[in-house]
Image (tube, helix red, strand yellow):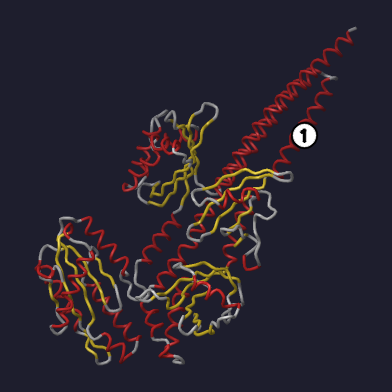
Amino acid sequence: MKKNVLLRTNFLVCIVIVIGFVVTSAISYKSNQGIFRKDIESVSRLTSEGIYHQIDTIFTKPINISLTMANDSLLKDFLEGEEEHLGDRDFIDTMRDYLNTYRDKYGYDSVFLASVKTKNYYYYNGLDRVLQEGDPENVWFYSFLEQDTDYGIQIDNDQVEGAGNEVTIFINCRITDGDGDVMGVVGVGFRVDSLQALLQGYENDFGVNAYLVDEEGNVEISGTYTRFQGDSNLFEGCAFAKLKDTILGSREGTQNLWYSSKKSSGYVVSRFIENLGWYLIIDHDTTKLNERLSLQLLREMTIVVITILLVLITITSVIRRYNKKIIELTVKAEKVHQAVFKEATEQLYENIYEFDITHNQAASEATSAYFESLGAPPDIPFDKALGIIAQKQIKEEYREGYIRTFHPDNVLEAFENGRDNLQYDFMITTDGETYYWMRITAHIFRWQEDNSVRMLVYRQNIDEQKRHELYMMEQMQKDSLTGLYNKVATQEHVRRMLEQGPDQLFAFFILDIDYFKEVNDRLGHAAGDKVLVEFSGTLAGQFGKDAVVGRIGGDEFIAFLSVTGAEMAKEHAGELIRALRNRTEGGVSITASIGVVLAVGKETDFETLYKKADFALYKAKRQGRNRYVIAAADDENK
């Protein structure tokens, strides 16, 4: 009788345990899947962001360098005079030295110039070949001439002598004359394997597949493939082929899509890269991870079945062990997922903090501890803590933007407008003296448990990358020969000074080297370049750091600065005439003619200043050169 009661008791306990396990496992499995999906989404988005910004950095530099060369007057002069110097070794060597200088300075694998008139193809070792029409290897040249774009990107083998026929990414830029007619194509190239290595690195580190595809879905570059190997459409036979129109139909923002088929499932992140005209696609295949998650559940079930059998022998011991096991398994599963996400994100970011935006407070112990480490009282509202962080760590000129970007009101407004990401770059210090560049990327989402809006903040040290970008921006503004501002940068700086000083009096100088054409004709372009370099050095030395000094044409220069009156402008002009006249080059006396105009910032603009100063320069030339003329009031409509 007692045995039957014990059996019935054990049986009932087993039933209860089985029911409890099934319910617990179902809840745990669903919860783990939710955590798993969030981890996949976060890692995929962060991978996409990392690759996007690195690719943007990689291509911005060669595109800007190619565009700079395309607007260089030296190249245009070379192409204009090319037919007159066919077979002239010195003439060709001038271009070889020019291209080799860019190659050495920026470290590119290829730097080239192709002429429309002669079809000659020059590279850093001289004249390589003639681009005959009809040759399949020259299709790129004639196809690009038919396109209506300033620049284009092409993957091809590098055929020049010594290049080993390596697969290379070329940036092609048009060179046009004053009438807009194409004179030639100039550009740079770098080996495709460096970009493949970037994609392969992310694939190995985060278990994803990364592709760069064109607007038709053809793969341009992946970790193991390039377009040069032949056409391969990503959407032919892939697991997310049905998403093709959705992915390729949008150029705005980021596409985040789950997909599922009979054989596989996963998560796709796509983003259009404007500079390249390509799509970056990150495919995170979750098939094996789902299988492992199901296998883990199966293993847990097996363990519980064994535990139930043990219950029939010692019910009390089994119950205790079973409860302990369930707790351990649940905690272990959560810790595994948290560890995977933490490892993936910490490889990219310095710190991660969480905020409850709806309730204006920190949402984790680490965030609260960070606030307190900066002297903030416990339980301080998030918007107040922003001010403390800005005051103690952030450089003064970035504080207002930092607070405005991450203020709870702005975060809530952005989320309501459909934005789930915010980003801000600024300079920060940890010791109060040394500042470095930091990027904060914030992900906004809704927390299902209490329906609040929350924000995860990722802090990333981008000091090296940012300083390199600023350096490249500075280099883009400079004339390659003289080191002064180029034409575009000169105009922009003058316009900015006029806007910032509406009531300030300014002096605008246009300088032209007298007899410069005679130097070029008699002594050659090398001597002309030497004169330009020496002239620009003397010119720059006559002005302080607050003045704008630039080269806007072959031998035409501009200087712009604020003055206290006409006398100050005359003194500057006189000193310039004296400083620039005491030199000769090959028997040719080097002097300068100067046109000057004075104006108040709010009463003029760059175009008006240039027109009036140019007319004054014309007068100086007619009066015998080697002098300056200040524009009169009646020159307004000249």
Which quadrant, please, contains the N terminus? top right
| Whole-percent x, y for residue 390 in the image | 36, 41
**Number of numbered discs visible in the structure rendering:** 1
Which quadrant, please, contains the C terminus? bottom left
Q: Residue furthest top?
A: 1
Residue count near mark 1 (Cα–Cα under 10 Å), binned few <14, some 14–19, many ≥20 = few
Q: In the image, is residue 338 above or below residue 110? A: above
Foreground residue, 385 or 403?
Answer: 403
* Residue visible at 33% across and 43% down in the picture: 400
| Whole-percent x, y for residue 47 in the image | 56, 50
* Residue visible at 65% across and 48% down in the picture: 242
Residue kind at label 1, given as amino acid type: Leu
* Residue visible at 35% across and 66% down in the picture: 477
Q: In the image, is residue 347 above or below residue 151? A: above
Foreground residue, 179 or 616?
Answer: 179
- In the picture of the structure, the residue carrying the numbered disc 1 is 298
* Residue visible at 40% across and 90% down in the picture: 84
| SS at mark 1 in the image | helix
| Whole-percent x, y for residue 537 in the image | 27, 76
Q: In the image, is residue 101 above or below residue 636? A: below
Q: In the image, is residue 550 above or below residue 114? A: above
- Residue 150, quarter of picture: bottom left
| Whole-percent x, y for residue 445 in the image | 51, 36
- Residue 258, quarter of picture: top right
- Residue 224, quarter of picture: bottom right
